[in-house]
Amino acid sequence: MSKIEEVKANVEKGKTKLVPGLVQEALDEGSSAMDILQAMIEAMGVVGDKFSSGILFVPEMLIAAKAMSLGVNVLRPHLEGGAAASLGTCVIGTVKGDLHDIGKNLVSMMVGSAGFNMVDLGVDVPAEKFIQAVKDHKDVKIVACSGLLSTTMPAMRETLAAIKASGLSGFKVMVGGAPVTPEFAFEIGADAYAADAGSAAVKAKELALSL
Ligand code: B1M
């Protein structure tokens, strides 16, 4: 089994003590940070499928998520681009009712690397908190909303409606997350949709430069 396959297998099993060391060993062997990240994302896909099939339960999902987060911490310096922050501020959060944060954290890391100051509101973020953050921070150019549950897509819609109703301007809104589609993004009035963290960074930069 290659080191990357070991990383994947141990994220799936939620081996929190082993994963950081294996990620480091994979890097030391010359694997790219993006390939290791991709393997961990695939592992979470397997965990999700096993959850859907009733083979795994919430505690196992939680521990696999913890293992992945620890692995991402090891990758972080290799993924971050280190651009001088000059594109403005990006407010990011996972919408109300939704506790998933791994994808949001990856998006935050990549968008930050593209040159934004990140204001991360965390998970389960109500619309008012997004709005308050725009008011509280200077130079907000992007509001980024993540959602992983089909049941929290209405919260994403409500968040965008509340932002629009607030009358605040001078920034663009980007949405993403597994159940979100470009069609849904368009329907709820988002300025952009991104499928993954890398394209979110590209999109955020494009949006900020278009303002
Ligand atoms: Co949850 N969960 N979960 N879960 N969980 C999913 C999402 C699920 C698909 C599993 C399944 O059934 N197959 C399913 C949702 C089904 C649906 O809605 N259609 C599900 C469910 C049902 C639930 C609970 C309801 C389970 C329960 O309690 N009965 C519950 C809900 C809790 C809540 O939020 N209120 C729940 C809980 C949890 C844990 C807390 C145990 C844990 C999360 C821990 C954490 O995040 N710290 C968890 C996990 C780990 C998962 C899976 C297994 C993995 C998610 C993940 O981290 N993926 C997930 C199954 C899966 O994804 N296949 C599942 C890796 C991550 C890198 O990918 O988050 O998709 P992702 O992010 C990507 C893109 O989506 C995109 O870029 C990222 C990186 O490339 N992206 C954006 C994300 N945000 C973006 C924003 C952007 C742009 C792109 O712009 C702003």
Image (cartoon, grey):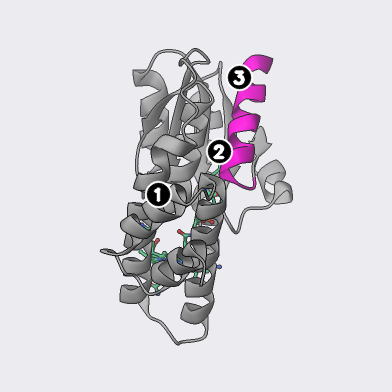
Quadrant of the snapshot with the C terminus: top right
Residue range of the region highlighted in magenta in the rendering = 195-211
> How many residues crowd around disc 1 within 10 Å: few (fewer than 14), some, or many (20 or more)?
many
Amino acid marked by disc 3: Ala
Label 1 to label 3: alpha-carbon separation: 27 Å
Is 37 a magenta residue?
no
Q: Secondary structure at mark 2?
A: helix
Amino acid type of the residue tagged 1 in the rendering: Val
Visible residue check, residue 75? yes
The reply to whether discs 3 and 2 touch (Cβ–Cβ < 8 Å) is: no
Query: Do callouts 1 and 2 mark residues in contact (Cβ within 8 Å)?
Result: no
Say if disc 3 is inside 8 Å of ligand 1.
no
Cβ of disc 2 within 8 Å of ligand 1?
A: no
Mark 1 or mark 3: name the one nearer the start of the chain.
1
Quadrant location of residue 153?
bottom right
Per the image, the residue denoted by label 2 is 161
Labels 1 & 3 near each other (Cβ < 8 A): no
Is residue 93 shown left or right of residue 53? Answer: left
User: From the viewer's perspective, is residue 52 above or below residue 145?
Assistant: below
Q: Position of residue 71 (x, y in %)?
A: 37, 54
Q: Is residue 206 magenta?
A: yes
Residue pictured at 52% horizontal, 22% vertical: 167
Question: Label 2 is placed on what type of residue?
Answer: Ala
For disc 1, the marked residue is 72
Identify the main secondary structure in magenta.
helix
Which label is found at residue 208?
3
| Sequence order check, earlier mark of 1 and 2 | 1
> What residue is rendered at 56% in x and 21% in y?
171
Give whichever of 66, 119 is nearer the camera: 66
